Amino acid sequence: MSQPKSHPSWIGHTISGRYKIESLLGQGGMSSVYKATDPNLRRTVAVKLIHPHLSSDEQFVRRFEQEAAAVAQLRHPNIIQVFDFNHDGDVYYMVLEFIPGETLQDRLKSLNDSNRQFELADTVKIMATICDAVAYAHDKGMIHRDLKPANVMLNPNGQPVLMDFGVAKMLGTAQHTATGAIIGTAKYMSPEQARGERPDARTDIYSLGVMLFEMITGAAPFDDESTVSILMKHVTEEPPDINQIKADIPPGLAAVVKRALAKDRNDRYQSAAEMAAALRAVDLAEQPLPAAAPVPQPDPDKTVLQTPGAHTSVVPPSASLPSPTSNVAVPMWAIGVVIVLLILILAGGAYALFNRG
């Protein structure tokens, strides 16, 4: 078939003479995801189509195919299944299990819009289940590297299903991207990712901690107007005290959040299974500790840099951020690093935004 030039033109087409595209589910910098029908097996599926500008990138297509094959080996009730990977001419696609429902991100937005948050019992249950799925993937040698609410579906039964391993990496294999490249979504990225260091399973633990924090409070621990500013905060600032935001958090749950968000990966949970066990051990009836008085924070000069929002991105190795410091303002040389990073991003140093649909 000929390659359509815009997203809506896919609708009504049949891919490889089999998958009939019905509607657009979502899109990002790497791909678009469509609802489709597989008449051979008489079922609804999701079809992820790589954008045309990436379909012509042989290295990207090879990586996408390798990771599709790896994820297809995962068999877990809380991980989306991959059914097929193929191409129709120069159109590359992946066929996935169709999960009805809404994303965790959509649910969080709906709750925030009505000034509500998840019940703590639901938060613990959902996050422990996500940890189970991540632990299974880790045991199979795969780290996700882009865990976030947008990559979790909540099915009609309220069960979370982990999606989108588009930037996943097999443990123990050579990195597909340049050494030191930054891959992930800024608000959920670990300090070591922000510095361009090699990720491991504990990198996913940090992202799980950010998600847990957001489910409890309604907001991620770090946010700002620019991607660079958020990355700097992950590296240099301690996360807010969750009890200062919500005073009714049981000490055990606050402790799980704090440990998962440790700057040093050696201080975090060393496995997703360990974090799942810690969540299930939380006594939700435990009385919260009295909140400590907030510690005054210095107000250093702030440089606001306009860059792309909290998109999944790849940033060149030369943009690595400084190691964490304790209770000190960001030095001028670090601001210089930020400015260099901004120039590289605007000049096309980030060769793709991995914000998938």
Image (cartoon, helix red, strand yellow):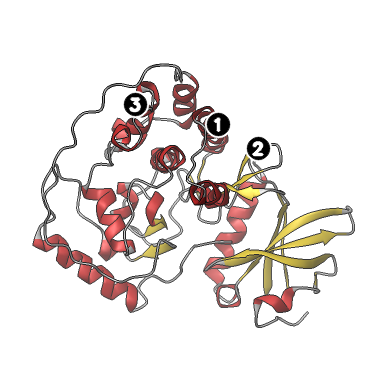
Label 1 or label 2, whichever comes before in sequence order: 1
**Mark 3 = which residue?**
255
**In the image, what residue type sits under mark 1?**
Asp
Which numbered tag is attached to residue 13? Answer: none
Q: Judge left or right: residue 215 versus residue 193.
A: right
**Mark 1 = which residue?**
122
CB-based contact (under 8 Å), mark 1 and mark 3 = no
Q: Looking at the picture, does residue 8 appear above or below residue 44?
A: below
How many angstroms separate mark 1 from mark 3 (CA)? Answer: 18 Å
Residue drawn where x is 62% and y is 59% of the image: 65
Locate residue 77, reporting x and y percent.
68, 36
**In the image, what residue type sits under mark 2?**
Gly
Locate residue 260, reporting x and y percent.
36, 34
| Residue 303 visible in image | yes
Label 1 or label 3, whichever comes before in sequence order: 1
Give the number of the mark in front: 1 or 3.
1
Locate residue 187, reporting x and y percent.
38, 53
Residue drawn where x is 33% and y is 70% of the image: 307
Image quarter in which the C terminus is found? bottom right
**How would you rate the neighbour count of disc 3 (Cα within 10 Å): few for under 14, some for 14-19, many for 20 or more?**
some
Q: Judge left or right: residue 171 versus residue 229.
A: right
Mark 1 secondary-structure assignment: helix
CB-based contact (under 8 Å), mark 1 and mark 2 = yes
Mark 2 secondary-structure assignment: loop
Q: Residue 327 versus residue 314: which sits nearer the camera?
A: 327
Q: Looking at the picture, does residue 71 appear above or below residue 179?
A: above
Image quarter in which the N terminus is found? bottom right
Q: Residue furthest front?
A: 114
**Mark 2 = which residue?**
158
Residue drawn where x is 18% and y is 66% of the image: 303
Mark 3 secondary-structure assignment: helix
